[in-house]
Amino acid sequence: MTKLLVNDDHQRAVEALRRSYAAIPEGTPVRLAKKTSNLFRWRDPSAAPGLDVSGFDRVLSVDPETRTAQVQGMTTYEDLVAATLPHGLMPTVVPQLKTITLGGAVTGLGIESSSFHLGLPHESVLEMEVLTGDGQVVTATRDNEHSDLFFGFPNSYGTLGYSLRLKIELVPVKPYVKVRHLRFDDAVAATNALAELSESRTHDGEPIDFLDGTVFGPGEQYLTLGTFTDTAPYTSDYTGQQIYYRSIQQRSVDFLTVHDYIWRWDTDWFWCSGAFGVQNPTVRRLWPDKAKRSDVYRKMVAYDRRFQVIARIERWRGLRPREDVIQDIEVPVERLPEFLEFFHDKVGMTPVWLCPLRARESWPLYPLEPGRTYVNVGFWGTVRLPPGQIPEYHNRLIERRVAALDGHKSLYSTAFYSRDEFWRYYDGDTYRRLKNAYDPAKRLLDLYDKCVRGR
């Protein structure tokens, strides 16, 4: 492993952060002062002092020979991809939204259509420099004295420490991606194909580099296969008037530049831009292309969440309240039809995103069986509450069904588990050992308190 001669700016930023951390009174909760967030656990931004991490947002180096990069923890994937593509390289897994940070994807988990053979973003990490809860800066790898932190960091959501620098693997790319959309009329057929394609990584004699799916309803689901290619007869542009997810229903074959494929979901925040009228042709023409971005929509949601504009209007109109159902879950591939049947019956939200994944190693705080195919199901929107039901009715239903199907639920959004349930699903014994080792004074929040109680 090559050693990085960390530049002076990074070292100065590390020392400044340590001083800032030490200056926060003990017993006071700590948070990061970040410009953007992709979390959907809403809380008062003034609830805790913010650590200034603005000095940790750069790509320090890209090494084309070893296919590695040294990256600061607050670097967005938008900036990381911009630094690696000129070298014909990309991170092994690039989460769908441009402002997700590398450190966030590692501590909070990320996923994308290369996950069916390359795992999750944290599995590309070779070493990480971490500011731990006790104020120390340590370097953790798979096999050094901090290997327990290395393997326990994913899914800890900043409750053990914050990543300051990460060395990650990169993979080679070609200039274009050929996209094939395969339609299936029922979930069982789509699931069987998803399982087979995840195993074989080929279709009709062509390799598969990317694999995901979109469910438009019980009788209409698509698997999308992406293959790197050196040439393309044309390329589609979904950053302006055209909408990517609609093309899935309209085209069987398509071509995108590798850059546009990586960010195909960000322009319309998958399909959620429709809530702001951005998919209306007239509105779309007037809406600046530079504002067709997930972080813009996320800020609009945050504004509405704060001032309850839509909720006030709907109450005035006498409509039943809506529940935010914004979640990503994983179930074993063979249980996918059961989950989709439940989801269509009890929730009824469409479209739904499917993304197969295989963990390459064991990661205790998010215990997926290595080599086993799971499917991430993503759904983001609101659902009208049935009369007389509690505000979190649908989310609680989903949690129970996912657990019954031997699945897991991502923690970037709301969760309602009891404390005992939570630690049973997310390895409480391991977490407590890590907490005692790296944050003995409990300066950082506990994972349950942060992700469920919303402190």
Image (spheres, rainbow, N blue to C red):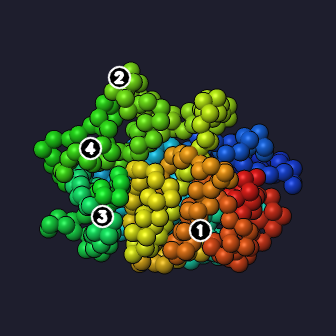
Residue at the spot x=42%, y=65% of the render?
A: 341
Q: Nearer the viewer, mark 3 or mark 4?
A: 3
Indicate which disc residue 247 carries: 4
Residue picked out by circle 3: 186
Residue type indicated by callout 4: Ser
User: Regarding mark 4 in the picture, which secondary structure is present there?
Assistant: helix
Residue at the spot x=74%, y=57% of the render?
A: 453
> Would you call the spot at circle 2 few (<14 residues within 10 Å), some (14-19), or many (20 or more)?
few
Residue type indicated by callout 2: Thr
Q: In the rendered image, is residue 11 in sight? A: no
Residue picked out by circle 1: 400
Residue picked out by circle 2: 282
Indicate which disc residue 260 carries: none
- In this view, 138 is above or below 281: below
Q: Position of residue 17 (x, y in %)?
A: 71, 48
Q: Spatial distance from mark 4 to mark 2, Cα to Cα?
A: 19 Å
Q: Nearer the viewer, residue 397 or 110?
A: 397
Residue at the spot x=56%, y=62% of the render?
A: 398
Q: Spatial distance from mark 3 to mark 1, Cα to Cα?
A: 24 Å
Q: Nearer the viewer, mark 2 or mark 3?
A: 3
Mark nearer the N terminus (1 vs 2): 2
Q: Nearer the viewer, residue 254 or 312?
A: 312
Q: Position of residue 406 (x, y in %)?
A: 52, 76
Q: Do residues under tags 1 and 2 come within 8 Å of each other at their CB atoms?
A: no
Q: Do residues under tags 2 and 3 come within 8 Å of each other at their CB atoms?
A: no
User: Regarding mark 3 in the picture, which secondary structure is present there?
Assistant: loop
